[in-house]
Image: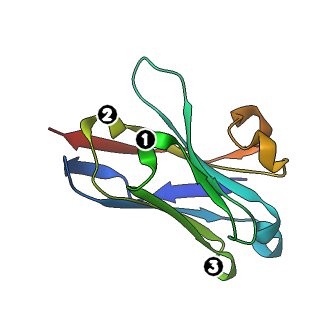
């Protein structure tokens, strides 16, 4: 059963914006999961982009995303979003939504996330 489904990717010019969404099938347990966003560019390893606690009260972003990306969640709608502004060509990647029950200190470790979406392609042209 597919637990996470991403949407919102696409082709955008540098400086543009995209909003990625991830809908989960967790139901009333959604709020217990830390939700993360990761990305993988061609020929590179998958890397952490950001994450948000179950309550939405705490977030973290990789340094290159700070000031440009915003993570939010709506537990009533079982949805987490990644608003990406000021996109750069180096943001081009497949973006994955992930969910897990993990210590906050392990939030950058993809092996701590037990559920993954299928990914959505983001392409930023220069």
Residue pointed to by mark 3: 77
Query: What separation in Å lies between label 2 and label 1 (alpha carbons)?
Result: 10 Å
Residue at the image position 73 percent from the left and 53 percent from the top? 1
Q: Nearer the viewer, residue 55 or 20?
A: 55
Where disc 3 sits, the SS reads: helix
Residue pointed to by mark 1: 64
Whether tag 2 and tag 1 are in contact, CB under 8 A, the answer is yes
Instruction: Please provide percent x and percent y for residue 118.
Output: 55, 44
Where disc 1 sits, the SS reads: helix
Whether tag 3 and tag 2 are in contact, CB under 8 A, the answer is no
Q: Nearer the viewer, mark 2 or mark 1?
A: 1
Left or right: 83 with respect to 107?
Answer: left
Q: Nearer the viewer, mark 3 or mark 2?
A: 2
Residue pointed to by mark 2: 90
Sequence-earlier tag: 1 or 3: 1
Instruction: Please provide percent x and percent y for residue 99.
Output: 72, 52
Instruction: Please provide percent x and percent y for residue 50.
Output: 57, 49
How is the model colour-coded? rainbow
Sequence-earlier tag: 3 or 2: 3
Residue at the image position 72 percent from the left and 62 percent from the top? 53
Query: What separation in Å lies between label 3 and label 2 (alpha carbons)?
Result: 31 Å
Residue at the image position 69 percent from the left and 35 percent from the top? 110
Q: Is residue 108 visible?
A: yes
Compared with residue 98, is residue 69 higher up or lower down, i.e. above or below? below
Compared with residue 53, is residue 94 higher up or lower down, i.e. above or below? above
Sequence-earlier tag: 2 or 1: 1
- Quarter of the image where one finds residue 26: bottom right
Q: Is residue 92 visible?
A: no
Query: What separation in Å lies between label 1 and label 3 (alpha carbons)?
Result: 29 Å
Mark 3, residues whose alpha carbon is within 10 Å: few (<14), some, or many (≥20)? few
């Amino acid at each position: 059963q597919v637990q996470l489904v991403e949407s919102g990717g696409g082709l955008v010019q540098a400086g543009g914006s995209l909003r990625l969404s991830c809908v989960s099938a967790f139901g009333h347990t959604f709020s217990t999961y830390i939700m993360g966003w990761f990305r993988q560019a061609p020929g590179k390893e998958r890397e952490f982009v950001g994450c948000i606690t179950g309550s939405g009260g705490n977030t973290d972003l990789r340094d290159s995303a700070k000031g440009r990306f915003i993570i939010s969640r709506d537990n009533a709608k079982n949805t987490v979003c990644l608003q990406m502004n000021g996109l750069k060509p180096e943001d081009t990647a497949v973006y994955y939504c992930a969910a897990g029950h993990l210590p906050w200190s392990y939030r950058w470790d993809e092996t701590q996330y037990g559920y993954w979406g299928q990914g959505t392609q983001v392409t930023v042209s220069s």
